[in-house]
Image (cartoon, grey):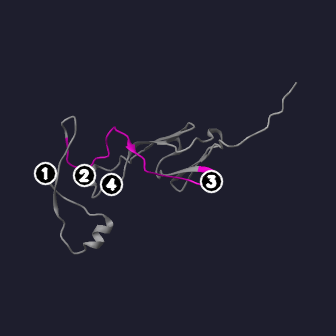
């Protein structure tokens, strides 16, 4: 077992101000037999994008923080009942790993697939990015809408 000093959250530090950090055992075993001792964001597996999903009367809205992602490195695919967001946040490679005091930001590929609670109108969907926040607005399909067709002769 490896010993590591745990780092409390911001709120945890406020609550326990003046207390010493606890030592905790850290060992994560994976199916491939390798052990991870510390978090490392320089790996090939894509991270999962955190999202908020809500609905109002007419739309389903998805919000995700994508700060630092170039629009060309962001892809949003939509079907009537699924949205998939993929992207890549590039890291600045001018800093050596040994120079960091903290390295908590996620760098690399990420994705998220969201099963929608209702079918949406793909043609009228909209995605905007403003100040690092991606907002996807998906108009709901109105299954109860009726239209009269004129019969041509």
Image spot of residue 122 (x, y percent)? 61, 39
Q: Secondary structure at mark 4?
A: loop
**Disc 4 or disc 3, which is closer to the eye?**
3
**Disc 1 or disc 2, which is closer to the eye?**
1
Residue contact between numbered discs 3 and 1, judged by CB atoms under 8 Å: no
Residue contact between numbered discs 1 and 2, judged by CB atoms under 8 Å: no
Residue contact between numbered discs 4 and 1, judged by CB atoms under 8 Å: no
Q: Secondary structure at mark 3?
A: loop
Residue at coordinates 59% horizontally, 54% vertically from top-left? 56
Residue at coordinates 28% horizontally, 69% vertically from top-left? 13
Disc number placed over residue 57 in the picture, else none? 3
Residue 130, compared with residue 139, is above or below; it is: below
Q: How many marks?
A: 4
| Residue stretch rendered in magenta on the structure | 35-59
Label 1 vs label 2: CA separation? 20 Å
Residue contact between numbered discs 4 and 3, judged by CB atoms under 8 Å: no
**Disc 2 or disc 3, which is closer to the eye?**
3
Image spot of residue 103 (x, y percent)? 31, 54
Residue at the disc numbered 2 = 98
Residue at the disc numbered 1 = 2
Q: Are there few (<14), some (14-19), or many (20+) residues within 10 Å of tag 3?
A: few
Q: Is residue 25 left or right of residue 94?
A: left
Label 2 vs label 3: CA separation? 52 Å
Disc number placed over residue 104 in the picture, else none? 4
Image spot of residue 72 (x, y percent)? 52, 41
Q: Which mark is first along the chain, 2 or 4?
A: 2
Front residue of 69 and 111: 111
């Amino acid at each position: 077992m490896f010993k590591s000093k745990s780092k409390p959250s911001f709120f945890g530090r406020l609550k326990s101000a003046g207390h010493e950090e606890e030592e905790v055992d850290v060992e994560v075993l994976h199916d491939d037999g390798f052990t991870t001792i510390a978090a490392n964001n320089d790996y090939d597996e894509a991270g999962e994008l955190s999202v908020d999903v809500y609905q109002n009367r007419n739309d389903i809205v998805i919000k995700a923080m994508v700060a630092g992602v170039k629009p060309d490195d962001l892809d949003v695919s939509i079907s009537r009942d699924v949205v998939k967001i993929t992207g890549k946040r590039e890291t600045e490679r001018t800093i050596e790993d040994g120079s960091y005091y903290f390295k908590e930001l996620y760098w690399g590929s990420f994705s998220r697939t969201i099963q929608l609670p209702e079918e949406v109108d793909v043609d009228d969907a909209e995605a905007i990015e403003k100040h690092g926040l991606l907002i996807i607005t998906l108009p709901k399909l109105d299954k109860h809408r009726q239209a009269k067709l004129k019969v041509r002769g």
